[in-house]
Image (cartoon, rainbow, N blue to C red):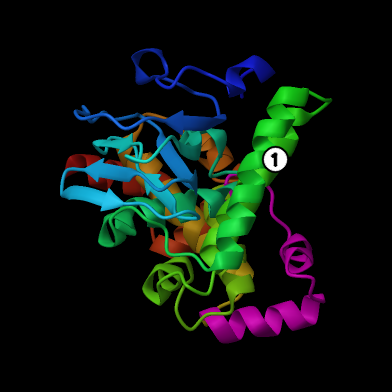
């Protein structure tokens, strides 16, 4: 994130480039002619007062106080002030690079942004929120601004926490279309197991203990085993092994990594154990798979 002075930037970031979170209160006058622009980052826009309009390629949208808009990276848009006075708003630039898919919690934030990217044009870029949800989003944005201005210790961490809370508010709001929310979750699966599976998919290259997975769900080991087997039809160890073997086979065929390197990159410190698991999975040794695939 930028230093605290960057939380009050000019209305247009130089060259439309930023790798930082930028959030500020914005006053917009009415203009007879507006040129649309794009950003390489997502933009959230909260209408505080005096309405105004949002202009996108499909037309002009009248804003109401409390409306929250989202413009994905690359979408043409521009805001215009009302005829009656200055439109008051909060503008938030949110780069995807703020979150990492390898961090628990961050991967949720990325999925929420992905859902907004895919569906937001269905509602003319307005995020359908309840009045309570709108107030929570406004509060989070104002807190981000305050953290940037005050610059207290760990203010960037505090600002990121507020942004995660804002995204959480959005995905849990009762007015958000159900198909958006269902896309976030795996249908007919315990959400805790969905999170565990996602964790294994993102961290398969590191040591993962079943006790660690059970703790993530606040479950005892036997209860975790029972729920996972019921939901997935296999054990957590079998699920993790399948992920690792899939990536191991891809690396063997698509890269020049040594077999020892492939084993390490797939979470196996013992090369002999890797050979045994791989042959049990595919009926061939890693070397045989590499030679046969390359021959084809």
Please name the residue shown 21% across and 48% down the image.
Answer: 60
Residue 237 x/y as whole percent:
62, 67
* Left or right side of 218 for 282: left
Residue most toward the front? Answer: 84
Residue 228 shows in this picture: yes
Residue name at image x 43 percent, y 22 percent:
11
**Quadrant in which the N terminus appears:** top right
Residue carrying label 1: 143
What residue is rendered at 76% in x and 60% in y? 212
Position of the C terminus by quadrant = top left
Q: Quadrant of residue 229?
A: bottom right
In this orientation, which residue lies closer to the viewer: 166 or 132? 132
Residue 148: x, y in percent? 69, 26
Q: Residue at x 59, y 52 (%)?
A: 137
Q: Position of residue 164 (x, y in %)?
A: 62, 48
Residue 207 in magenta stretch = yes
Instruction: Give the magenta-colored segment's residue range.
Output: 203-232
């Amino acid at each position: 994130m930028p230093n605290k002075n960057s939380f009050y930037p000019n209305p247009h970031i130089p060259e439309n480039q930023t790798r930082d979170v930028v959030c500020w209160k914005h006053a917009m006058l009415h203009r007879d002619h507006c040129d649309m622009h794009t950003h390489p980052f997502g933009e959230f826009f909260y209408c505080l007062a005096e309405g105004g309009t949002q202009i996108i390629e499909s037309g002009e949208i009248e804003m109401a106080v409390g409306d929250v808009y989202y413009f994905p990276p690359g979408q043409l848009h521009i805001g215009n002030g009302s005829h009656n006075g200055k439109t008051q708003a909060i503008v938030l630039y949110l780069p995807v690079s703020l979150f990492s898919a390898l961090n628990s919690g961050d991967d949720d934030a990325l999925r929420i942004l992905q859902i907004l990217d895919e569906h937001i044009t269905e509602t003319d870029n307005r995020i359908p929120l309840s009045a309570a949800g709108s107030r929570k989003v406004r509060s989070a944005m104002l807190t981000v601004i305050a953290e940037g201005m005050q610059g207290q210790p760990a203010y960037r961490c505090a600002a990121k926490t507020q942004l995660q809370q804002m995204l959480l508010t959005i995905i849990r709001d009762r007015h958000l279309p159900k198909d958006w929310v269902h896309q976030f979750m795996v249908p007919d699966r315990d959400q805790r197991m969905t999170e565990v599976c996602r964790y294994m998919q993102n961290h398969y290259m590191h040591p993962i203990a079943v006790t660690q997975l059970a703790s993530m769900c606040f479950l005892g080991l036997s209860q975790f085993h029972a729920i996972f087997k019921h939901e997935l039809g296999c054990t957590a160890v079998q699920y993790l092994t399948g992920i690792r073997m899939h990536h191991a086979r891809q690396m063997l065929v698509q890269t020049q990594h040594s077999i020892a390197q492939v084993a390490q990159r797939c979470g196996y410190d013992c090369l002999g154990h890797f050979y045994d698991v791989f042959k049990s999975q595919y009926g061939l040794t890693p070397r045989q798979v590499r030679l046969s695939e390359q021959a084809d």
